[in-house]
Amino acid sequence: MTSLAAAGASGAATGANGGAPAAVAGASGAVAGAAGSASGGTGGSGGACPVWPIKAAPAPAEVTFNGVSIKSSEHDCAWRLSNSVKLPVTTTHTRMLFHYDVNGDGIDDVYVGPNLDDPNPPAPPNPRTITLLLSKLDGSALSYESTGCELAPPLVDGTYALRDLDGDGVNDFVIAVNNGFRVVMNRPTGPELTITYDFPAITRPQLSLRDVVLGAFEQSPTSELAVGFMRIDNFASTHSGVLLFPDPAHASAQAPVSLVSSDQQGNGFDVSLNPQLAIFTALPGGRALFGASTHDTWVYQKGKLATTAGGLQLGIGDAPYVSGATYLDLISVGGHDRVFACVGDKAYGFDPQDPKQHLTIPLAFAEYTACRLVDVDGDGDLDLVDTQLANTPSIGVHNGDQANGPATQSHQFTPDRYRAPSSDTPFLAVGALKGRLLVSDADRGDVRGFPLTVSALVCGP
Ligand SMILES: [Ca+2]
Ligand SMILES: [Ca+2]
Ligand SMILES: [Ca+2]
Ligand SMILES: [Ca+2]
């Protein structure tokens, strides 16, 4: 894993590693309430949820969850999935928004929000509430318990990407709400809203967050925040693109730079629907963004956009163009930083300067596939997880290897019922075990029969 990726490159690898709480040792008011002095609090029955992490204790080398043990020594395993456990949430709060370790036991805690089809959403300006499930260790036995606390503004219901925007080792919040973005810094004194950006008002907004990357992409070495989005306005038109926010860690009304958008000049194929446009990653070094649209690839560096019509061709023969990528990230293979792309039914790791030199990994599933790079077993290499999102969602894990990258073979499993969360990654970290717990969101249409659940990735038969 490169230092760049650790600093907030796109994708699951960063989302999974949580708050790195060790860096905040000695901070006063460690379990600061979220509400602070924010006005218009939700008046939640259980008070405000903590968001500032306390120093993590070393997680036990072995944790038991739902009767099965998961051990820190378990690498390169034949994975299987344990039975799922229902999390103690109300039927109105069944969607995982984000997760990291806030109570300092080394195990991710889970912040959950209302089901997207909440039949009784609060009337504006009251935000829909977010509640916290805390990990609880009884000896080595892990369970989750509801706190009853609720997050107050400026944290609101939406889709979240967690990135450390000021380099203090604690994740901050990038949130897509109905009609725009909020950036909320995670401070010892409580959350601080730094960016409020809204698109022009429409009647039925629908906005989703795509890739979110921190790096220095303009002339100066200071960092900007690149936010990829897709929005559907009034169910009538679709827009996607990337906005670049300068200095996201400090409050500013400065307008973002629109890097690329679905009505981008010079891209005659872009009409309205170009969902891939918001898929991008930083190039190694963190000074350039590399992205893909349906028909192009683009690079943004030193404040300039360069577009490669037709995209970047990978390899030889009928190998595809990166412009069809559904996922981009960075990976280190054999000591070399590579761009990692999922295109069609294969994943590739390549040098953008010489894309014909690449590794090729067949995905476990050919259609409706979502990719993630995450260190599932905590052995220090990134594993490729591909998820089939079709009628019977299944998951494949390609065990990683620092010398060769993720394996071409995958361990595949099909959870009893699975719906990928809107969170950065569905995998919760268990200490050094990284992504060993898999979360499934509730089914929007069947919340009671299919609540928020967690299962463990278990080693061996
Ligand atoms: Ca915890
Ligand atoms: Ca931070
Ligand atoms: Ca691994
Ligand atoms: Ca491995």
Image (cartoon, rainbow, N blue to C red):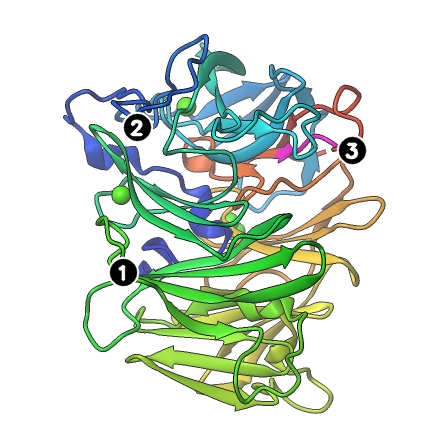
Q: Position of residue 219 (x, y in %)?
A: 22, 78
The numbered mark, 3 or 1, whose residue comes first in the sequence reads 1
Depth check: 137 or 123 in front? 123
Q: Quadrant of residue 33?
A: top left
Residue 417 is labelled as: 3
User: Is residue 408 at all visible to an observer of this figure?
Assistant: no
| Residue 155 pos. (x, y %) | 40, 33
Could you say which quadrant of the image residue 106 lies in? Answer: top left
Neighbor class of circle 3 (other Cα within 10 Å; few <14, some 14-19, many 20+) is: some
Kindly check if marks 2 and 3 are in contact, taking CB atoms under 8 A apart as contact.
no
Nearest the viewer among 155 and 443 is 155
Q: Is residue 367 rendered to the left or right of residue 255?
A: right
**Disc 1 target residue:** 254
Q: Is mark 2 within 8 Å of ligand 1?
A: no
The 10 Å Cα crowd at callout 2, few under 14, some 14 to 19, many 20 or more, is many
Relative vertical location of residue 301 with respect to residue 282 in this rendering, above or below: below
